[in-house]
Image (cartoon, coloured by chain):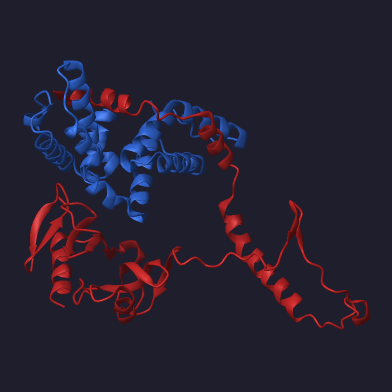
Chain colours: A red, B blue
Amino acid sequence: MAHMKDFREIADKNMEGIKVNSQLRAKTLAKLHEKPSSTRFLVPVIAAASLVLILGIAFWPKSSPLFPEGNLKEPQPLLYPEEPNMILSEPRITPLRINDKGTWSLDTATEAKENFGESFLMPSLVPQGFVLESIQASGKFNETDRIVLNYLESNREDGVRVDSRERRFQVIQEKVASPWEVVGFDVVDLEGYVGFLSPDEDENNELHFFNENTHYLIVGALEKDELIEIANSMITE
Amino acid sequence: MYSLQTKKLSREQLEKEIQRLIDLYGEDVLRTSYMYLKDLQKAEDVFQEVFIKVFNKYETFQGKSSEKTWIIQITINLCKDTLRSSWLKRALLTDKSAIQDALDWSPSTESQVVQSVENKLLFSEVLNLPTVFKDVVLLYYYHSYDTKEISAILKIKEGTVRSRLYRARKILKDKLEGRIDFDGSYERL
């Protein structure tokens, strides 16, 4: 019989090996000196500078004073200093790998359907005042496995957002190996589909449902009734 | 209790203060992150983010709660951000391998070994709880906060905390098929 009152002791025993070692401590303290904003600024600057350099080399006139025609030498094979006997026959360029995962923006629901496939569901009803702010897709090259619809409450009368009372919600659709039961959530009926609604009233609520191997999640600052209404509008679309 | 200094500190003093906080609460932060994320590498990433945030927001701490409460609150929020931004959430909801391994294991007649397996099962099931329940269980049973303090940390009503604790205990009781004792607190809430 396990005693819940001993949970702290039980948990610590199970995490005996999880400790703040000197390496983690030093890494954390070193990071206090980093300035992420300047790094963020430097990345596009370095990228732009590299591009200018590459273009400059590619289009530099051969008869320019820097490379007078008469002094041009036959190109020499390049050698790697660490591998002195290896001649470079081809440039060492890492190709874009097909398995790289990425995230990109889409403009319309039609695009989202084209990317994600037939299982993409667009809500036909959203609570009054909400507008679709953006659509994000993610996955591997040519294989979208996740779509996120971001909705934002705005003042539709004059088109100006009321930021102080701004509410947001997301509709997430993702391909999964198989559906699962969301333990501890309330089971609700969604036009014949089983939905899992987060328990209790909270600032943020969530509703999950599945259709074959697609997981749908509506999450955000909405009432439970609103979540169900959105889900039903997707199913009966 | 509210020992964070509110006066303006020099950079050097602030770094010393962060070192003190790491010494005092580092292990709690790392282990709490691990219990949310179930991945040591990700827990270590959150650990670093927590203390960077404490460093950057140090002067905004108003002393309304204890320094530990403030740091644990930051930890929980960052863990939830990590869960939201990755597919880990699904893994947490579905990962039953640990408990299955324990169930498949034949218990020895040695009561000590049986107890150890039951404790492992309990730990595993707490880690598999949905986040809304794990929040309250970890704050109540691991960090020993009362329901009022948990209500302030999670910014939910105290009644909601009690009802989530009740439901979490029910889930654990069902999952562990009676091999768990709440010392009467299950019935009381």
Please indicate whether residue B142 sits to the left or right of residue A59 in the image: left
Residue A211 % position (x, y): 17, 66
Task: Tell which of A142 and B55 is nearer to you.
Answer: A142
Image quadrant assignment for residue A221: bottom left
Task: Tell which of B98 and A111 is nearer to you.
Answer: B98
Please indicate whether residue B95 sits to the left or right of residue A20 in the image: left
Confirm whether residue A173 shows in the render: yes
Residue reaching furthest right? Answer: A70
The vertical placement of A206 against B101, above or below, is: below
Confirm whether residue B66 shows in the render: no
Please indicate whether residue B12 sits to the left or right of residue B77 in the image: right
Residue reaching furthest front? Answer: A85
The vertical placement of A222 against A125, above or below, is: above
The residue shown at (20%, 71%) is: A127
Q: Quadrant of the C terminus of chain B?
A: top left
Image quadrant assignment for residue B10: top right
Residue A130 % position (x, y): 26, 72
Residue A14 % position (x, y): 31, 28
Residue A184 % position (x, y): 14, 47
Image quadrant assignment for residue A9: top left
Say how many tags the image has: 0
Please indicate whether residue B6 sits to the left or right of residue B163 in the image: right
Q: Quadrant of the N terminus of chain B?
A: top left
The vertical placement of B7 against A145, above or below, is: above
